Image (cartoon, rainbow, N blue to C red):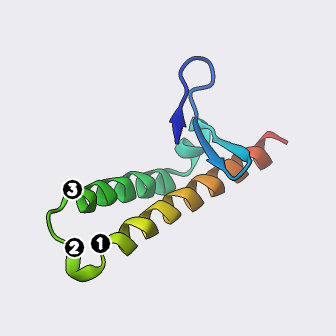
Amino acid sequence: MKFISGMFLGAVLTVGTWTVAAQPIERALHPRLSRAITALQDARAYMQEAPHDFGGHKVAAIEACDRAIEQIRLALAYRGERDRR
């Protein structure tokens, strides 16, 4: 994920060969999704730094967090695209 400053202040997610932009307005309109991304990022960072492997589930849990964050961002970007039409 890349963050851009300036007029477009949105999160940009590159998926495959195309880029999806989640506008801040979409995060504001869907605060539960925004909070979910923040919580998943926090959980991922906690697990990444943990000295133990959570009974062998650490790697899979981190990967699941990454996939969930990506899907929520894609959902927000989709909603933003639909709302701009």
Q: Earlier in the sequence, mark 1 or mark 2?
A: 2
Q: Which mark is residue 73?
A: none
Circle 3 residues within 10 Å: few <14, some 14–19, many ≥20: few
Of 71 and 15, the residue lying toward us: 15
12 over 64 or under it: above or below: above
Residue hosting label 2: 53
Q: What element carries label 3?
A: helix
Q: What element carries label 1?
A: helix
Say which amino acid is labelled 3.
Glu
Q: Residue at image x 68%, y 45%?
A: 20
Q: Give the CA distance from mark 3 to mark 1.
A: 10 Å
Residue hosting label 1: 58
Residue hosting label 3: 49
Q: Residue at image x 58%, y 33%?
A: 10
Looking at the rendered image, the quarter that the C terminus falls into is: top right
Q: Is mark 2 on a helix, strand or loop?
A: loop
Circle 2 residues within 10 Å: few <14, some 14–19, many ≥20: few
Q: Is there CB contact under 8 Å for labels 1 and 2?
A: yes
Q: Give the CA distance from mark 3 to mark 2.
A: 10 Å
